[in-house]
Image (cartoon, helix red, strand yellow):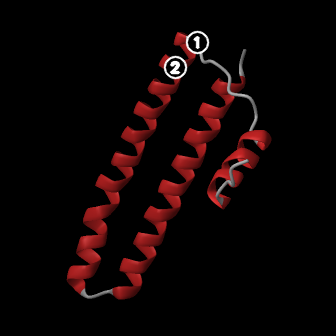
Amino acid sequence: MTLKSSWELALERTAKNAPPATKLTDAQKAKLAEIDRIYKAKIAEEEITLQPKIAAARAKGDAEATQKIEEQLRTQLERLRRKCEEEKETIRQRP
């Protein structure tokens, strides 16, 4: 009998609790890739739009405006990433 490390035991427990892996169809894979592409573009667009505003606020020395715009950027990026994952999960759940 061999002793298992705590890492090996944790892996076994995780594998038991994980949902069974489902195979994705080629159409699902293509749709997931398309969703990734769309949201990467939306994220880049937000960054391109707000980064110059952040730089301008910093150049003026307006810490409050800088912080406000940075928070707006973080919020928008988080929202887009969450929406992307929700759409991808919907695709994964379809038979």
Left or right: residue 1 versus residue 44 is right
| Residue at the (48%, 17%) spot, across then down | 30
At mark 2, the secondary structure is: helix
| Residue at the (56%, 52%) spot, across then down | 79
Q: Residue furthest right?
A: 17
Q: Which residue is mark 1?
A: 25
Q: Nearer the viewer, residue 26 or 44?
A: 26
- Asked if the residues shown at circle 1 and circle 2 are in contact, with their CB atoms under 8 angstroms apart, the answer is yes
| Residue at the (72%, 14%) spot, across then down | 95
Type of the residue with mark 2:
Lys
Judge the density around disc 1: few (<14), some (14-19), many (≥20) Cα neighbours within 10 Å: few
In three-dimensional space, the C-alpha distance between marks 1 and 2, rounded to whole angstroms, equals 6 Å
Q: Which residue is mark 2?
A: 29
Q: Nearer the viewer, residue 28 or 71?
A: 28
Q: Residue 22 placed where, x, y %?
A: 68, 22
At mark 1, the secondary structure is: loop
